[in-house]
Image (cartoon, grey):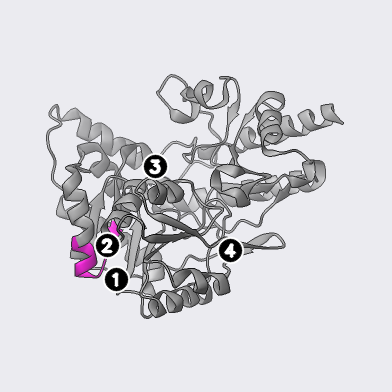
Amino acid sequence: MKGGLDPEYFNRIINREQTNSVKYDGRQGIFGKSNVTPAWVADMDFAVPPAVTEALIARARHPIYGYTLFPDSLYDATIDWIQRRHGWTIARDWIVMCPGVVPSLNATVMAFTRPGESVIIQPPVYFPFFSAVTQTDRKLIENPLKRNHDRYVIDFEHLEHCAKDAHLLLLCSPHNPVGRVWSPQELEQLLTIAERHNLIIFSDEIHADLIYPDNKHTVLATLNGSNKHVITAMTPSKTFNIPGLNLSALIIPDKTIRKAINDVFNSWHISASNPFSITAFETAYREGEEWLEALRIYLRDTRNCVAAYLNEHLTKIQLISSEGTYLLWLDCNAMNMNDTELKHFFVHEANVGMSPGILFGTEGSGFMRLNIGAPRHTVMHILKNIHQAYNRRT
């Protein structure tokens, strides 16, 4: 990035209203009012790396936007990024380009289970993990995460029991919404159970690059014994704030598993090939690293500001220790409100639009998910609104 990144880059307030933004222009439909400060859907209010914008403008100047191939350079950029950032050497033919991670969840469920067969998820977890199973007539097996003070861990004893009856495990790594970055030891224990019960694992690692600087992400498929049964989802969409362009990659070393996934995608006749998504994807991976390093520091500092503010002014809300993602998991149980009352309080009294924890499973009751992917002024404004609203009640 020529000349380095302006220190104020992430402090810029960018008006997203009337851009057909789900986060902003969808507020009336989601919250019943349009004047809430939105901190819910998982995109950020930061401008993308300048190189991405410049590349998109250059592509737009060519006046024909026809059917588009995935170029060799796209695969090369993906391979280089994953090697450089995660130490994983992958082959080109392992990569399956696809239209987003949520469709990939559904495709995986359909490829490796039949109606009535069982799929394991680990709530509280991103809600499409539930629907990928229930809406395809599969049986949902829940292996809830265990709360251990201010962080969550996997209940391996219960997972061993669940795995006896399941065919597939949907793993969220790093975990949305609880912010855990699973350790190599935890992941190895998970793989041991999967191998013992012949489980295929879909590892959603789309937040793998959004790790706070004092933590490290481990790609599940880099561990011993993983290549036989792991499907890894990666994408620059969350990392570089381009999720609206709908392009992601599945990394699948096993040829048989790869064919099964491709067969499902081919049956849907949906192309992920878009001239703008390809341009943004490749450019972000090639030229976005300096931007990302600055972002990670900015998000870490924002997380720390949130923690300090809650500790001083909002002691009824506990921040669960967050190691990755720009999504914070807030324990609001001490506020002594049920989920309906919590939603009303935040939306109608504090004018803040967060994601209710109950969306992520019954284990999320009493929690809220806060998106801090915004200028710090906006995040602090949200907290002050909550503080003032709560003081009015007391």
The magenta region covers 250-259
Name the residue beneath numbered marker 2: 79
Residue 51 x %, y %: 33, 42
Q: Is residue 365 above or below residue 384?
A: below
Mark 4 vs mark 2, CA separation in Å: 25 Å
State the residue position of label 4: 214
Task: Give the CA distance from mark 3 to mark 4.
Answer: 23 Å
Above or below, 232 relative to 64: below
Give the residue at the far front of this rendering. Answer: 116
Question: SS for tag 2?
Answer: helix
Residue 15 visible within the image: no
Whole-percent x and y of residue 316?
A: 79, 44
Residue drawn at (52%, 77%) of the image: 185
Q: Is residue 335 magenta?
A: no
Secondary element at tag 3: loop
Quote the CA–CA distance across marks 1 and 3.
26 Å
Mark 1 nearby-residue class (10 Å; few <14, some 14–19, many ≥20): few
Question: Can you tell which of label 3 and label 4 is closer to the viewer?
Answer: 4
Q: Which mark is residue 49?
A: 3
